Image: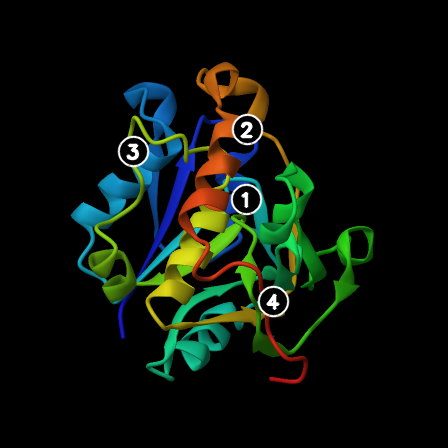
């Protein structure tokens, strides 16, 4: 099993220190130079990589677990697993979301888990491994065949980009019949370090991106995994 580690960056001052914490070769996508959007750069990495697993990590995520690679590979040893991450939720979407008028909050995550440094601020601390419904985009390890089957990442003019891409890949993974796994890897997400540098952020289609998820994934939303799996 081969794995390529990818990070798109706008080169905030500490990004190289964060990427060095993985102790693994990182393919750095310099969006500051290229002007690519996040999804354009993620697609470029997918096209250029021939790895079995393509790992997309934020440039402000510090990996504190020297065994992260083994834990990720253990999850992918099961061919039914299509997506692995370090922060996720057991539930995705209001159970009654399609029986009442649309509200943005209906797409929310519930029973959020992670082993982030500040895990309790976001939900529950979790150090094991389990099935989840949806992952956070801070770390997404995608089985190559999942991206092949869905034709790669959304591209312009899709509203899915900086907003809701983690919802999109989670829903797509479920639609294709693969499981999503959370690995409770010790890490620290510094959060938002590139946000203020993003030249495309003013054009981020926040509402449109969520409508896209709501409208196009009725077959897999809402969804909740059984605890203990």
- What is the x, y in percent for residue 28? 35, 39
- What is the x, y in percent for residue 6? 36, 48
Q: Earlier in the sequence, mark 4 or mark 2?
A: 4
Spatial CA distance of label 4 from label 1 is 15 Å
Spatial CA distance of label 1 from label 2 is 31 Å
Local secondary structure at mark 4: loop
Local secondary structure at mark 1: helix
Graded by Cα atoms within 10 Å as few (under 14), some (14 to 19) or many (20 or more), the crowding at tag 3 reads some
Residue under circle 4?
185
Q: Quadrant of the C terminus?
A: bottom right
**What numbered label is drawn on residue 40?**
3
* Circles 3 and 2: CB atoms closer than 8 Å: no
Apparent side of residue 30 relative to residue 168 in the rendered image (left or right): left
**Front disc: 3 or 4:** 3
* Circles 4 and 1: CB atoms closer than 8 Å: no
Instruction: Please say whether residue 57 is visible from this viewpoint.
Output: no
Graded by Cα atoms within 10 Å as few (under 14), some (14 to 19) or many (20 or more), the crowding at tag 4 reads many
Q: Earlier in the sequence, mark 4 or mark 1?
A: 1
Going 42% across and 66% down the picture, which residue do you hit? 174
Residue under circle 2?
207
Q: Earlier in the sequence, mark 3 or mark 1?
A: 1
Quadrant of the image occupied by residue 77: bottom left
Q: Earlier in the sequence, mark 3 or mark 2?
A: 3
Going 56% across and 52% down the picture, which residue do you hit? 136
């Amino acid at each position: 099993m081969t794995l390529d580690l990818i990070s798109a960056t706008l080169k905030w001052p500490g990004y190289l220190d964060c990427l060095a914490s993985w102790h693994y070769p990182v393919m750095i996508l310099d969006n500051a130079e290229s002007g690519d959007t996040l999804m354009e750069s993620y697609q470029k990495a997918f096209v250029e990589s021939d790895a079995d697993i393509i790992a997309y990590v934020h440039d402000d995520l510090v990996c504190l677990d020297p065994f992260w690679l083994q834990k990720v590979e253990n999850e992918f040893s099961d061919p039914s697993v299509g997506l692995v991450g370090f922060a996720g939720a057991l539930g995705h979407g209001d159970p009654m979301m399609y029986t009442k008028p649309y509200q943005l909050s209906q797409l929310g995550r519930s029973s959020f888990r992670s082993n982030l440094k500040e895990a309790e601020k976001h939900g529950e601390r979790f150090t094991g491994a389990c099935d989840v419904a949806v992952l956070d985009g801070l770390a997404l390890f995608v089985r190559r065949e999942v991206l092949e089957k869905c034709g790669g990442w959304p591209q312009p003019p899709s509203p899915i980009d900086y907003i809701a891409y983690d919802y999109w890949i989670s829903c797509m993974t479920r639609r294709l019949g693969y499981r999503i796994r959370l690995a409770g890897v010790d890490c620290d997400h510094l959060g938002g370090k590139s946000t203020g540098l993003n030249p495309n952020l003013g054009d981020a289609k926040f509402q449109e991106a969520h409508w896209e998820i709501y409208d196009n994934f009725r077959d897999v939303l809402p969804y909740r995994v059984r605890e203990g799996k």
